[in-house]
Image (cartoon, grey):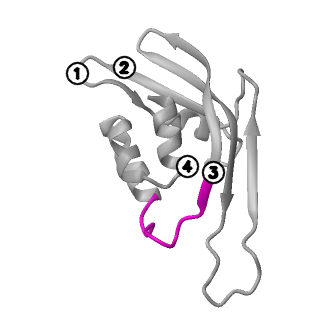
Amino acid sequence: MALEYTRAVARGDFKAAIPLVVPSQRVLLEAVTLGQGPGTLPKVTGEVSLGEVLEDGDNATVSILGKMCRTEVAAESSTSAPTTDCIENYDLKTDSPVFLVHLARDAATGWKVVFNLDAADNSGAPDGG
């Protein structure tokens, strides 16, 4: 599930990724992907595999190992070659949000991706209060 989700998001296939997310959080991924369509997404290449799976009851965290690269879509009028940026992880215990997937198990639907919003709340950003 975690690897399937990571690969779908990496290749920009959000129609395949959204059903893998818990229903109550799908709107978050849908909002992020607004305006994405053919010709707007970078080309993604790479090779990823499952790393460590830590299961705790109905929750799990999965690290993803490997390398992902993306090449931006060049404008038709551009004369320069598109640039490629790569990121990689080979640490089983990574805390990188790019290479870490959180899952929750539901009796009716099985394992689904869940966004760790608590991690975002604890990022050190001011809370406006």
Mostly what secondary structure, the magenta segment?
Answer: loop
Kindly identify which numbered label has been placed on residue 10. Answer: 4
Between 18 and 128, which is closer to the camera in this rendering?
A: 18
Crowd class of label 3 (few under 14; some 14 to 19; many from 20; radius 10 Å): some
The residue stretch that appears in magenta: 33-44
Farthest residue, direction left? 108
The answer to whether marks 3 and 2 mark residues whose Cβ atoms lie closer than 8 Å is: no
Q: Point out the tag, 3 or 4, that comes first from the N-terminus.
A: 4
* Residue 41 is covered by the magenta coloring: yes
Q: Residue 117: x and y, percent?
A: 52, 37
Q: Which residue is identified by label 2?
A: 105
Tell me what residue is drawn at x 22 percent, y 21 percent: 108
Q: Which residue is mark 3?
A: 45
Left or right of residue 118, residue 106 in this image = left
Residue 109, horizontal then vertical, whole percent:
26, 25
**Residue 89 in view (yes/no):** yes
CA gap, disc 3 and disc 4: 8 Å
Q: Are marks 1 and 4 in contact (CB under 8 Å)?
A: no
Q: Residues within 10 Å of mark 2 (few under 14, many from 20)?
A: some
Give the mark nearer the N terminus: 2 vs 4. Answer: 4
Question: Quick one: SS at disc 1?
Answer: loop
Q: Nearer the viewer, mark 3 or mark 1?
A: 3
- Residue located beneath label 1 in the image: 108
C-alpha gap between disc 3 and disc 2: 30 Å
* Residue 12 point in image, percent of width and height: 49, 55
Q: Amino acid at mark 3?
A: Thr
Secondary structure under the numbered disc 3 in the rendered image: strand
Mark in the foreground, 2 or 4:
4
Q: Is residue 83 left or right of residue 26?
A: right
